[in-house]
Amino acid sequence: MAVYVDPPLWPAHGTHFSHLISDTSIEELHAFAAAAGIPERAFDGDHYDVVEARYRALVAAGAVPVEGRILVRKLIASGLRIPARQRGKALKVPLLNRWSEVLPGHDALFLDLLDRWGEGHRKYHGRTHLLAVLEALDLLADPAAPPRTVLLAAWFHDAVYRGVADQDEEESARLAEDRLRHAGLPAAEVDEVARLVRLTAGHRPAPGDDAGALLSDADLSVLGGEPEAYGRYLAAVREDFAHIGDADFAAGRAAVVRQLLQLEPLFHTSRGRELWQAAARRNLRGELG
């Protein structure tokens, strides 16, 4: 029975953070944190996020210092770990790792986007969707890495989300233009990112638009999931529009499904068609039925 802490390596809010876990029980972890003066708001489901300034005091209080990979292994072995995909907040580390490969040195922009994707009213259009799109791009672009403009467009494509078709994409594109110009990206690159974000309003890239095809297919990859995953997607979409009555939602959703079924092709890359097309059309037809 022990409490463990990894080195303060994760940047956020102008400092770095450690993770504090127990290999026995959440109750033990809460008790240790309370005694160490760590606020409850620092708890993230199966661990505490602890600022760098508290690291030495935690070790002195009895927390066992271990490397990050060892800490993760101990948490998994304990049976206390919450799978990342079950909570958007837990995705900050894999998302930070991906952001650092795309636009290193811009932590403030990362945190702004992370907050936007983590807004409370988002159910489907949240951090899980963002990571799923980035992972889908990995599959589509393999073995080459996707272009930076495509990856940045994925980060911005639902950065503004209020559930208003076309308007969300336009505002997200304008946000990308503003933030990326401020970050010092070349004008041509900024324009391309904004163009790709706007394209996700209809998912109709022109023939020969390889970048648009990649982003469109990645954004729609959820349609080609297994039945259980597709059911979770539908439930989350319904929660996104909880403010709309059942009859109006059903009518609007049916229109969206019909529009998707009319897309020819539905997926624009050969890899996307191979991975998702058959299942996507089956899921969509089943939903409409």
Image (tube, grey):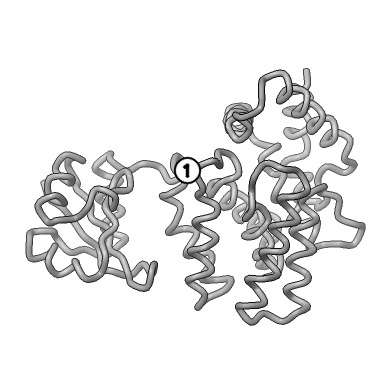
In which quadrant will I find the C terminus?
top right
Picture coordinates of residue 176, whole percent (x, y): 67, 66
What kind of residue is marked 1? Arg
Corner quadrant of residue 274: top right
Corner quadrant of residue 262: top right
Q: Would residue 32 be found to the left or right of residue 285 on screen? A: left
Picture coordinates of residue 230, whole percent (x, y): 63, 31
Q: Would residue 213 be found to the left or right of residue 142 on screen? A: right
- Identified at 31% across, 54% down, the residue is 72
Please state which of residues 158 and 78 is positioned toward the viewer in this rendering. Answer: 158
Residue furthest out toward the left = 61
User: Callout 1: few (<14), some (14-19), or many (20+) C-alpha neighbours within 10 Å?
Assistant: some
Picture coordinates of residue 270, whole percent (x, y): 81, 51
Residue for badge 1? 85
- Identified at 47% across, 58% down, the residue is 94
- Identified at 82% across, 36% down, the residue is 260
**Residue 1 visible here:** yes
